[in-house]
Image (tube, rainbow, N blue to C red):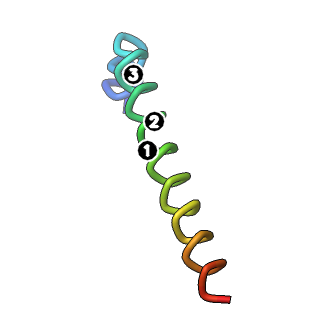
Amino acid sequence: MYLAIREMRFAKVRYSLIAAIILLVAFLVLFVTGLARGACL
């Protein structure tokens, strides 16, 4: 656990970029799902 916390402290930019990409992919999936459900009505 200590090693993971130390690694996150030294590589903040890398982990924040990974988190941002994951959030964007989740938003894209929700957006496309919403468009697909709206088109079916």
Classify residue 37 by image quadrant.
bottom right
Residue lying at 61% horizontally and 80% vertically, measured from the top left: 39
How many neighbours does mark 3 have within 10 angstroms: few (below 14), some (14-19), or many (20 or more)? some
Check the picture and name the quadrant holding the N terminus: top left
Q: How many marks?
A: 3
The residue tagged 2 is 19
How many neighbours does mark 1 have within 10 angstroms: few (below 14), some (14-19), or many (20 or more)? few
Residue type, mark 1 in image: Ile
Residue lying at 39% horizontally and 21% vertically, measured from the top left: 8
Q: Is residue 4 left or right of residue 35?
A: left
Residue lying at 62% horizontally and 70% vertically, measured from the top left: 34
**Residue 6 x, y percent position in the rendering:** 37, 17
The residue tagged 3 is 8
How many neighbours does mark 2 have within 10 angstroms: few (below 14), some (14-19), or many (20 or more)? few
Which of the numbered marks, if any, corresponds to residue 22?
1
**Residue 12 x, y percent position in the rendering:** 42, 16
Per the model, the C-alpha gap separating discs 1 and 2 is: 5 Å
Classify residue 5 by image quadrant.
top left
The reply to whether callout 3 and callout 2 are in contact (CB within 8 Å) is: no
Check the picture and name the quadrant holding the C terminus: bottom right
